[in-house]
Image (tube, rainbow, N blue to C red):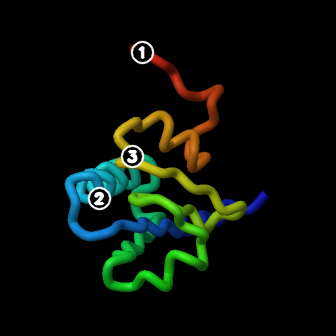
């Protein structure tokens, strides 16, 4: 097996600078720094500025996070405040390796 680390390509769809959008981006950056340091790229798409881009990834709600790479594509809707849900949803960690301390 090769040890080549691929870059994760994440796309965050928002509609303006709403509290939910700002929160989603800050949560995403925090998780990426903790778990994918130096191996991720975040593209933020504001659908108020570019509404036509919603169709490509079939975006029906905002904020929505789309993991483009690695495939398969995965989507998470909301402000990304539940770290475990985001990390499992993006497959950064598996369900088995996450420990629920609550």
Badge 3: residue crowd in 10 Å (few <14, some 14–19, many ≥20):
many
Q: Residue furthest right?
A: 1
How much space separates mark 3 and mark 2, taking CA atoms?
A: 9 Å
| Quadrant location of the N terminus in the rendered image | bottom right
Q: Which numbered disc, 3 or 1, marks the residue closer to the eye?
A: 3
Residue 29 vertical position relative to residue 102 in the rendered view, above or below: below
In x, y percent, where is residue 80?
A: 39, 46
Return the residue found at the far top: 102
Residue at image mark 1:
101
Among the two numbered marks 3 and 2 on one chain, the one whose residue lies closer to the N terminus: 2
Residue shown at the point (73%, 62%) measured from the top left: 2
- Quarter location, residue 45: bottom left
Give the SS element for disc 1: loop
At which x and y percent is residue 68? Answer: 60, 68
Along the line of sight, the residue nearer the viewer: 10 or 49 = 49
Q: Which residue is mark 3?
A: 80
Quadrant of the frame with the C terminus: top left
Residue beneath the point at 44% across and 48% down: 35
Q: Which residue is mark 2?
A: 21
Q: From mark 2 to mark 1, how far is it between C-alphas?
A: 27 Å
Relative placement, left or right, of 90 versus 43 is right
Q: Residue 94, image x and y in percent? A: 63, 36
Q: Is residue 79 left or right of residue 64?
A: left
- 43 with respect to 20 (left or right): right
């Amino acid at each position: 097996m090769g040890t080549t680390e691929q870059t994760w390509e994440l796309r965050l769809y928002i509609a303006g600078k709403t509290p939910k959008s700002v929160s989603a981006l800050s949560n995403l950056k925090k998780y990426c720094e903790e778990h994918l340091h130096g191996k991720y790229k975040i593209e933020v798409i504001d659908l108020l500025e570019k509404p036509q881009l919603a169709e490509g990834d079939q975006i029906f709600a905002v904020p929505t996070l789309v993991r483009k790479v690695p495939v398969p594509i995965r989507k998470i809707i909301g402000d990304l405040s539940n770290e475990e849900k985001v990390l499992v949803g993006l497959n950064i960690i598996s369900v088995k390796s996450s420990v629920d301390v609550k």
